[in-house]
């Protein structure tokens, strides 16, 4: 019995599938604490599980910070739009956008990095449009 055959009574024994024996090739790459790797094995080059988790946490924290930064740029763009539509001054919003663009973070996630670059490009376009409008004489 190796699969689920239906509901059974509570507390019924659960069959455990048989384990396959470890082959010699598998043993070359399996190292426990305190053992030296077998000749030809790559266990010494493999990162530890704790190291992998730590790297994921750093990448995750970096990506979360990059995502927050991108959302702040989008919020500043929305504020700029509201300022332009309301006819109020935009100097503070422009300065905020310039500061956010000057400190654009890097992300380890290629999709997030692409989104950050696209948002930053949009912000740069809006800043360039404002600069051109300021240089143009009003009619």
Image (cartoon, rainbow, N blue to C red):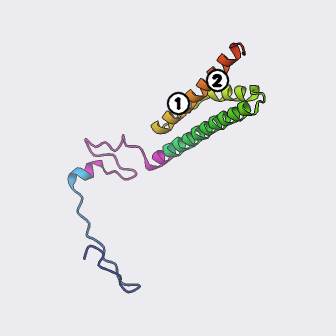
Q: Give the residues drawn in magenta, as a range.
A: 27-53
Q: Secondary structure at mark 2?
A: helix
Which residue is rendered at x = 30% and y = 75% of the image? 4
Q: Is residue 2 above or below residue 38?
A: below
Q: Is residue 59 above or below residue 119?
A: below
Q: Nearer the viewer, residue 67 or 55?
A: 67
Q: Residue lying furthest bottom in this view? A: 9
**Disc number at residue 117?**
1
Sequence-first disc among 1 and 2: 1
Q: Nearer the viewer, residue 31 or 20?
A: 20
Q: Nearer the viewer, residue 38 or 134?
A: 134
Residue for badge 2 = 127
Q: Position of residue 119 (x, y in %)?
A: 56, 32
- Alpha carbons under labels 1 and 2: distance apart: 15 Å
Q: Secondary structure at mark 1?
A: helix
Q: Residue lying furthest left in this view? A: 24
Is residue 49 a member of the stretch shown in magenta? Answer: yes
Q: Determine whether, in the image, residue 37 is placed left or right of residue 124.
A: left
How dense is the environment of label 2, judged by Cα within 10 Å: few (below 14), some, or many (20 and up)? some
């Amino acid at each position: 019995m190796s699969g689920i055959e239906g509901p059974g009574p509570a507390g019924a024994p659960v069959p455990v599938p048989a384990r396959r024996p470890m082959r010699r090739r598998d043993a070359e790459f399996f190292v426990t604490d305190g053992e030296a790797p077998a000749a030809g094995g790559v266990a010494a080059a493999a990162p530890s599980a704790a190291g992998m988790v730590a790297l994921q946490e750093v990448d995750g924290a970096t990506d979360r910070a990059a995502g927050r930064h991108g959302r702040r740029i989008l919020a500043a763009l929305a504020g700029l739009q509201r300022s332009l539509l309301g006819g109020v001054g935009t100097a503070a919003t422009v300065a905020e956008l310039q500061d956010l663009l000057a400190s654009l973070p890097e992300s380890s996630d290629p999709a997030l990095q692409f989104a950050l670059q696209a948002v930053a490009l949009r912000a740069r376009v809006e800043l360039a449009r404002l600069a051109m409008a300021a240089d143009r004489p009003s009619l």
